[in-house]
Image (tube, coloured by chain):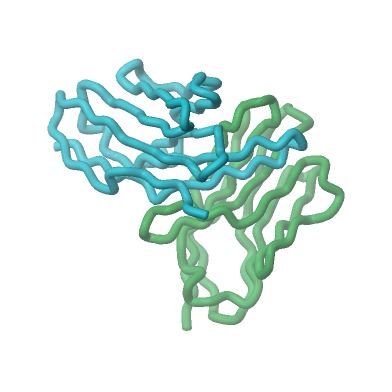
Chain colours: A green, B cyan
Amino acid sequence: AQKITQTQPGMFVQEKEAVTLDCTYDTSDPSYGLFWYKQPSSGEMIFLIYQGSYDQQNATEGRYSLNFQKARKSANLVISASQLGDSAMYFCAMREEGGSEKLVFGKGTKLTVNP
Amino acid sequence: KAGVTQTPRYLIKTRGQQVTLSCSPISGHRSVSWYQQTPGQGLQFLFEYFSETQRNKGNFPGRFSGRQFSNSRSEMNVSTLELGDSALYLCASSLLHKEGKNIQYFGAGTRLSVL
């Protein structure tokens, strides 16, 4: 069964610094996708970045990058140059590429950016 | 392009009542998925629809049902509401790519309170 583990319930970072949010996953499927979403207090889930299991390079999207270590089954999100607006819940999710769109989510990490 | 639209944003119901939530996907997206988010259980997959057919269903009782219309709009219904059904219900849509990189984009959610 798929499982996503986010071990950091809360993280604090100073504005303009970089922060890494941890995510490990478990699956027996060789083909899968990994996602990170941001959820501000308003509730909407905002897509940040995607990494496919067969992608050779780590994904990057602006200030977001994904540190994908397949052998360790980890997919950590790195946010560079943190901004106050980055304060939110961050969720790691996985989809097994078996035809369903079902996402399995971790418990999330609450990031607080301090001025 | 308009995002995923969920209506209503907030609902208050009493135990035993039923409720219907609506989701309009991004134009051109034919896959719609529903998730329930609670503080205790986190984000859990409810069901997924594609071309008016339910493709996958999560581990929820039969009181939870859904459907998708020919224009890809989707509704979910919860009958005989229980206090534990209080949650944020999120809808997501995706454009299915043959290459497999399908991104789910979420709406702002419907916050249901059962009294």
**Where is B89 relative to A23, above or below?**
above
Residue B107 drawn above or below residue A67: above
Residue at the farthest front position:
B71
Residue A48 in percent (x, y) is at 60, 57
- Can you say which quadrant of the picture contains the N terminus of chain A? top right
Quadrant in the picture for residue A98: top right
| Left or right for B111, reference B13 | right
Residue A27 vs A50, above or below: the answer is: above
Q: Compare residues B36 and B20 and report the one nearer the observer.
A: B20
Could you tell me residue A78's position as x and y percent?
Answer: 66, 64
Count of numbered marks: 0
Residue at point 54%, 80% (across, down)? A15
Q: Residue furthest bottom?
A: A115
Left or right of residue A104, residue B40 in this image:
left
- The residue shown at (53%, 50%) is A91
Q: Measuring from the top left, give residue B38's x and y in whole percent.
A: 35, 41
Q: Residue furthest right?
A: A56
Q: Which residue is rendered at x = 50% and y = 27% of the image?
A: B48
Closest to the observer: B6 or A58? Answer: B6
A4 or B34: nearer the viewer: B34
Q: Position of residue A99 (x, y in %)?
A: 66, 25
Tell me which residue sits at (50%, 51%) in the image.
Answer: A108
Based on the displayed image, in which of its 4 quarters is residue B94 positioned? top right
Q: Nearer the viewer, residue A61 or A65?
A: A61
Q: Quadrant of residue A79?
A: bottom right
